[in-house]
Amino acid sequence: MSRFSLRADGVPESLELVHDLLDEVWESEAGIDLMERIRFETALIEVASNIIEHSKPASSDPIRFRLELECSPERLYAEFHDNAKPAGIDLSAAPLQEDLSSLDNISSTGRGLALAKVALDEFSYAKLVSGNKWTLMCKRNASQDTAGS
Amino acid sequence: MIEFINDTLANGVGVIRPIGRLNMVSAPHLGANIEALINGGTVRLVVDLAGTDFIDSSGLGALITGLKKSRQAGGDLRLANPTPQITAVLEMTNLNRVLQPVASVEEAY
């Protein structure tokens, strides 16, 4: 299993650091299926964007987050910890089903966490005493094949 | 981080080419590019995604807003050359039902 991590400020420019860290993972762990990389990276960027865009500072300290990644043959796993005011997010209230029958009914916003949920095999959020924790997991094809055999 | 290369085809179709990643930082720039073309009278648009490495929900939002504005102006907004991540995101969100990409700019209209 290989591990990667970064610490970043809760600012939009930090999204590039998340992409850069994932590039590092893909380079050092050859052979990860393209769809697995796409699902994982899409979800990570949505969660990082949510932290950056919606978090409220818990104190006079600026918002910061830590991202830890684990890559194994069975799964891609990530944890985000931030120092923001606990947000109390209910991921079950982030459905992606929407009425696509009329363009007027299709929203331009509010799709991020729902997209992360669809992209991942496991996705959870926990309010901490001082901050928030998000966990994200994509199963890898090899492990799904093994589970099915 | 992102660059937009725009041009207008002989048939009057406006082509917007975002080069880089479309995320919460760059999506507003895509929206502004689309709006500028519509305000200038170019209402039939193609977003050529061949050079767009990544899209997130805010990038999708800018495309939906652009689609609505172009249709309100009597035109349309279509997608061409999506990279695998964009195809996957359109499928995961089911937005490929309203933003169905084609394989090339020429096929868009």
Image: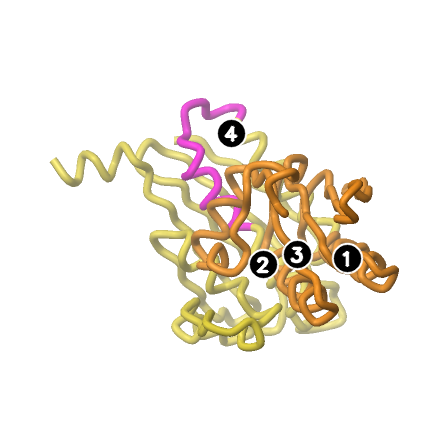
Chain colours: A yellow, B orange
Which quadrant would the C terminus of chain A be assigned to in this image? Answer: top left
Q: Position of residue A33 (x, y in %)?
A: 40, 31
Q: Position of residue B71 (x, y in %)?
A: 67, 67
The reply to whether the magenta stretch includes residue A132 is no
Marks 1,4: beta carbons within 8 A: no
Q: What is the CA distance from the residue labelled 2 to the residue labelled 4? A: 23 Å
Q: Residues within 10 Å of mark 3 (few under 14, many from 20)?
A: many
In this rendering, the answer to whether A45 lies above or below B83 is: below
Marks 3,1: beta carbons within 8 A: yes
Q: What is the CA distance from the residue labelled 3 to the residue labelled 2? A: 18 Å
Q: Chain of mark 2?
A: B
In this rendering, the answer to whether A110 lies above or below A16 is: below
Instruction: Give the residue type at disc 2.
Output: Ser
Q: Which residue is mark 2?
A: B57
Q: Which residue is mark 1?
A: B34
Q: Chain of mark 3?
A: B
Q: Chain of mark 1?
A: B
Marks 3,2: beta carbons within 8 A: no
Start-end of magenta stretch: A27-44
Q: Is residue B3 visible?
A: no
- Between tags 1 and 2, which lies in front? 1
Q: Which residue is mark 4?
A: A26
